[in-house]
Image (cartoon, rainbow, N blue to C red):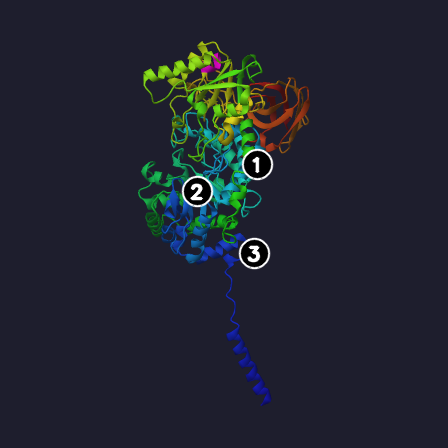
Amino acid sequence: MKKKNATILALLTMTFCSFNNPKHPVKLLYKDPASPVDKRVADLLSRMTTAEKIKQLDMYWGHQVANMKGHEAVSMSDNAKINIGTQGIGSVHDLYPLTAAITNQIQRCALEKTRLGIPVLFIEEGLHGYESLGSTTFPTPMALAGAWDTAIVHKAGRIIATEMRAHGVGMILGPVLCLPRDPRWGRVEETYGEDPYLAAANGVAMVKGLQGRMLSDPDAVLSEPKHFAVHGVPEAGSNTAPVNMGEREARSSFLYVFEKAVKEGGALGMMAAYSEIDGIPCVDNRWLLKDVLRKEWGFKGFVLSDLGAIKMSLNNHQIASSPADALGQTFTAGLDMQFYDFPHDQFLDAMTQALKNKQLSLSDLNRAVSNVLRVKFMLGLFDHPYIDEELLKKVNHTESSRAAALKAAQESISLLKNENSLLPLGTNVHSVAVIGPLAESTYLGGYANKEGKGVAIVDGLKQRAGNSLDIKYEKGYSSDTSAAKQTELLQKAIGTVSSADVTIVVLGEDINEVGEGKDRSDLDLNEQQTRLIEAVHKTGKPTVVVLFNGRPLCINWVAKKVPAIVESWFLGDAGGLAIADVLLGKVNPSGKLPMTFPRSVGQLPYYYNHKPTSRHVYVDQDTSALFPFGHGLSYTTFQYSGLKIAQPRIPHNGSIDISISIKNTGRVEGTEVVQLYLRDVIASVTTPVKSLKGFKRITLKPGESGIVQFKMDNKELMLWNREMKQVVEPGEFKIMIGSSSEDIRARGSFYVK
C-alpha cells in the first residue's frame, strides 16, 4: 500500500510540475542561426502560402512605405503597415532613407506584424557612390576604368557599401558590366569601357568591395551586376534596342565579364536586361538565366528584372498575350523578382493565374522564392535585421572617404595631347582665362544624387592656385539666350582670353545629352562649343581643352589644332580639385583611355580588339582611331626594355611568366600603366588582332627603373572552338607590351604544345 501511495504521489508531483513548468516552444528551424542557410530556406518555404511566396517576388516603391521629401525618405508612413500587411513584401526601392531609424522602423513592421516575420530587402542605386544626399561620390565607372587601378575600385566599393549599409540598405544595383562598343549609347559613362579584360578586372574588384568579407557584416551589401547580357551594343546605339550577335562572340567578350563577376567576384545578384538577343528577350531567355548563369557558372543569388522589362515582353517585344503569360514565361526562364512591372494586385492575380493555367510551375515559383530568401538569410536580415542608428554619422562621407574619392579622380584623368609641354602650367604663367559654362558645372555624373554637387573646375583651380594665378572666368556661350546675347558672351570671353597668358576651355556634354535614355545620333561638339573653341584658337593664345563628358567624342578639329587636351570624364565629389592638380602639375597624370575615340560615327562600332577583317577603310576619312584604347600621356617619359618570356613553350594547361623593365627617362616622378596584349596567330575560329590580357601600374622617380611582371594562365588563352567548346589550341601566341593598344614597345612569342 505504501508503495502504491508513493507511486500516486510521484505522478501527482509530476503533473503539478508540468503545469508550473510548461515546455518551451520549439524554435522554428528557419529562425535558428546555427542551421545551414539552405535548410532554413527550405523550412521557411514549406510554411508559406502561395500568396506569401508571390509577395516575396514583388518590389515596392519607397513612397509606398515612407513619407518622402524629394528623393529621400524622412519617416515611415502609415501606408507601410497596409502595404506590408500580414503577408510581407519582397523588397523596397527608391527609398533613400535619411537615417537608419527609418529602415529599422519599416523592418520592424515586417518582422513583427507579418505571419512569418520575413524581413524586407532594401535595394538602391550606387554605381559610383550611394545615391543618397551627402554620401561620397567617386568618379563615374568610365572614369574609374581610366585609372586602370583595381585597388582604388575595390576601395570605392568598400566605402559605398559601408555608407549604404549604415542607412539600412542591403543591395546595390550595380556594377554595370556592359561593353559599350557604340558610344552613341547614352549609358556609356556607367560602364568600365570597351574591353572585356579591363571591365572584368574592375567588375570583380567592385563586386568584392561591395560584398566585403561576409554579406552579414554591417559594411557589406549584395552586388547586382547588370545588364545581363550583351546590352551595350544595341542597334544604332539606342537604349533597349535589339542585339544581333552569335553565341561565340557573346561568350568570348560580353558573357566573359559577367562570368568573372560571378565566379571570381562571388556576385549574388544579377539584373536581366531590357533588350533581346537573337529574337529572345533577356528576361525570357532560359539559356542565359538557367543554363549559363546557374548551371555553368554556379550562380547562387537571385535575378531581378530591369525596370519594366517583363512588361516589355507584353507591350514591346510582343511575345506574350497577357500579364500572366509574360510572368509565366519570365519566371519559368529563370527570373526571380519583378521591378515595377505590374501593379501589386495585378502581379499577385497574374502570378496566381499563371500557376492555375500551368504557364508557371510550382517548382519554378519555389525556386524563385528560395533564391530571394537565400540572399536575405545571407545578408543576416533574419538574425540581426536592425542597423546601429549611430553608425551613419561615423562612416558617412568621412575625411578618409573624401581622400579616396580625390585620389580616384586624380588617377582617372588622361592627358591626350601635350605639344611643346604646355602642361603643366609653369611659373611663367601668371594669368589664366577659364572659358565655357561646363567649367562651373558641379555635375557628379549619372546615377548620383541630383542635389549633390562636386567641385567645379574653375573653383578647383582657384582653390589650388591661391594667389599664385590671376584666374578669370567667362561663359563664352549659353544655350538659352538670343543670338545677340550669344555674340556678347563670345566677345567677352575673347576679351578675357586676349589678356591672359593661357586659356583653359572646358568642352564636352551638357547633362541633358548624356546618361540613360540620352542616346545621340552624332558625337561632335555642338555648334556653340565649336564656335567658341575656333574663336579662342584665332587669338593665338596657348590653349588647353579639358573634356567634361561621359562618352568618347569626335573632336577632330580640336585634336588637330589645340596643343593640349585633357580627358576628365565626370569625376564625382572632388572633380575640379583633381583636374586643377593635373593642370598645375601637383599630380602627374597617369590615366589611360578605357575606350577608343572614333573620328566619326561612320566608323562605329570601332573598338581596338576587332577581328582582322574589320578594317574601317573609307575614301573620305583616315582609317585610324582619333585616340586609341589605352592611350594616355605623362609629364615624363618611359623606356621599355628587356622583355623576358620565362616559358617559350607550355602545355595547354600551363601558365606563362612575362617580365619587362620600365625606366623613367624624364625629369619628374610618374606612373606608367604597362599593358600586355595577346594575339592567337592561327586558330580554328577567327580571333581579335590583339586582346588585353594584363596591366600593371608602376611609379618611378626620374632615372629609376623597375621590373613589371605578369603571370598569364591558360584561361586567358582559351577560345570557343567550332564545336562551341572552350579550349586552348596549340600554336603560336604573340605577346605585345606597350603604353597603349597602338603604342607597342616590345614584342615576343611563345608556343602552346
Residue 638 x/y as whole percent = 63, 19
Mark closer to the chain start, 2 or 3: 3
Callout 3: helix, strand or loop? loop
Residue 710 x/y as whole percent = 64, 28
Callout 2: helix, strand or loop? loop
Identify residue type, mark 3: Ala
Q: Which residues are magenta?
A: 556-561
Residue 538's image quarter? top left
Chief secondary structure of the magenta span?
A: helix
Contact flag, marks 2 and 3 (Cβ < 8 Å)? no
Residue 419 x/y as whole percent = 54, 13
Residue at numbered disc 2: 96
Where residue 34 is drawn, which disc sits there?
3
In the image, 38: left or right of 237?
right
Nearest to the eye among marks 1 and 3: give it.
1
For residue 726, say whether it is visible.
no
Where residue 400 is drawn, which disc sits there?
1
